[in-house]
Amino acid sequence: MTERERAVRRVAPLLAAAVGLAGCMIMLAGNPEVECVPVPPAGAAAPVPVAAAVQAQVFEDAIHALAAEVREEQIHYALLRESLLAAGLMTEARPQRGLDTLEIGLEIEVERSGSIPLRVASTATFRVLPCWTRVHYLARARAGYRGRPLPPFAYERSATLIESIALFPIAPFFAPDLVEVQIRRDAIHALITHLAAALAAEGDGS
């Protein structure tokens, strides 16, 4: 047996344990709280497509790194741009700033709270002892159009991350990654609806 094979045999049980532990986690999301402009009534003037300049920042437990170092920022940035294009609110993927530029500043806060000793004990018992973590997700956006600020936007949602060996049968259906992706998409969808309503109101008032 080669040294490499022996190393693989030593590491394999650890990898199997890690995969098993990851497969015993679920996340349950609560109802969102949204501060936004009401959806305009049917027949209201549709917003004219504009150039958009987007910035995104993510704070994980109040700690922020540069955008290039934070994967979440890039995900939100790309998702917001794709959603603006799909909704017809943006004229091109890389627009030039001008009079009709829609300036968007998106800020994401993710805070996690839970008992650290309980989490350590749960890990040590391979999730026989369950533990849970509260995850609070807050998306705020500031936007301006033609030199005027648009109404602010906020999307707030909480979720509970539960870890227990008993959850293994249902874990694939409530995987934390899937739930977090859906929360992210719901927040961006609410923001797009908000921007469309705000721009429509601007068009009516011009």
Image: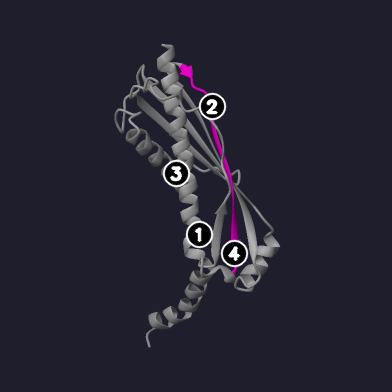
Q: Are marks 4 and 2 in contact (CB under 8 Å)?
A: no
- Residue of label 4: 163
Label 3 crowd (10 A; few <14 / some 14-19 / many >=20): some
Q: Which residue is under mark 1? A: 174
* Secondary structure beneath label 3: helix
Q: In the picture, which quadrant includes the C terminus?
A: top left
Q: Earlier in the sequence, mark 3 or mark 2?
A: 2
Q: Residue at x 48, y 30 (%)?
A: 105
| Outermost residue to the left | 92
The reply, left or right, for residue 38 in relation to residue 83 is right
Amino acid type of the residue that numbered disc 1 sits on in the rendered structure: Phe
Q: Crowding at label 2, few (<14), some or many (≥20) Cα neighbours within 10 Å?
A: some
Q: Amino acid at mark 2?
A: Pro
- Asked if the residue at tag 3 contacts the one at tag 4, i.e. Cβ–Cβ closer than 8 Å, the answer is no
Q: CA distance from mark 4 to mark 2?
A: 36 Å
Whether residue 70 is visible to the viewer of this picture, yes or no, is: no
Q: Look at mark 2 in the image and give the residue it sits on.
A: 152
As shown in the figure, which amino acid type bears the numbered disc 3? Arg
Q: Which residue is pictured at 54% across the width and 67% down the height?
A: 24
